[in-house]
Amino acid sequence: MRAMRAETFSGYQGLKLVELPKPAVTKGKVLVRITAAGVTPLDHTILSGKFHGSKAPLVLGNEGAGVVEEGGGTDFPVGSRVMFFGAYGAFEDGTNSEWVAVRKEDLCLIPDNVDDVSAAGIPVAYLTAQVALTLAGFRAGKTVLAPAIGGSIGNAVTQLARALGAKHAISSTTNHAKAEQAKALGFNEVIDTSLEKLGDGVRRITSGYGADIVVDGIGGEVLSEALGVLALGGSLTTLGYSASRKTTIDVINLIVPQASILST
């Protein structure tokens, strides 16, 4: 089978299209023909040599969608459309290939009204969003901020929080056109940081209250700014660094509201 494999972790030049044996189906695993592979920041981190534990050569791809060809039993009959994620693309060969032998417990049936390409991008973002909200103690009526509506985590957290009854489900973008597009799609609490600061926008939307829960996948200055909008007893969960892995925080933003920083 064909696979796009990282021969070395030296950037995109380390990728090479190779021919590999088709995976064998063993006990507890299901052979899935890949129809769409998700792309996540983890791929870039691994390919850049900044993720400890992964070893080259490695087929990247942490999530994907496809069709069951063998080993699914009655739970996942042959021909079933499935999506999945797990250790694939990090500690074992992933979804940037034609077939993957997937652990049965990692599989989920794709609803009929969701196409394979969309399904391939659901597991990492939405499960991460769900875990982050749960660990932060989310419940209906809370105010949630998830910066970057154009990013997978910002978008997923905002959608889930709103669906689960958040008082405010706030996000942001640095791009005015994206802000307008987001509003057209029904995201009516998106802060356009080309027009106002993140903190000012949160305080405007919440009438000065702030955010009970912040879930940040951006890092850098965004994390620092978001920390400054926490309400009394609030928490910030950091789980990404697309802008930067480093930031500077004002500890007063933790001490005064008796807030906390979490990670997932």
Image: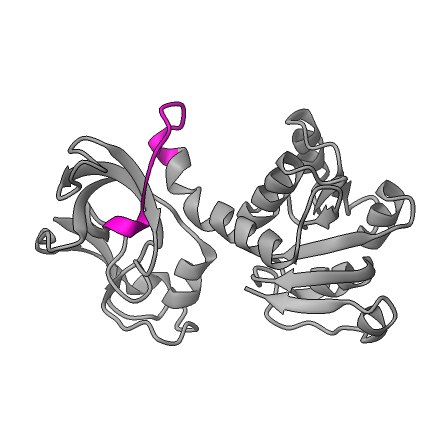
**Residue 6 at x, y percent in the picture:** 27, 63
Does the segment drawn in magenta span residue 107? yes
- Residue 12: quadrant of the picture: bottom left
Looking at the picture, does residue 49 appear above or below residue 96?
below
* Colour setting: one colour
Looking at the picture, does residue 228 appear above or below residue 188?
below
Point 24% across, 49% down: residue: 104
User: Is residue 38 shown to the viewer in this render?
Assistant: yes
User: In the rendered structure, which segment of residues is drawn in magenta?
Assistant: 104-117
Looking at the picture, does residue 178 appear above or below residue 225?
above
- Residue 59: quadrant of the picture: bottom left
Residue lying at the far right in this picture: please name it. Answer: 208
Point 37% across, 28% down: residue: 111
User: Is residue 96 shown to the viewer in this render?
Assistant: no
Query: Seen in the image, is 78 located left or right of residue 232?
Result: left
Query: Seen in the image, is 122 located left or right of residue 250?
Result: left
**Residue 193 at x, y percent in the picture:** 77, 47
Work out which quarter of the rendered image holds the C terminus and state it.
bottom right
- Residue 163: quadrant of the picture: top right
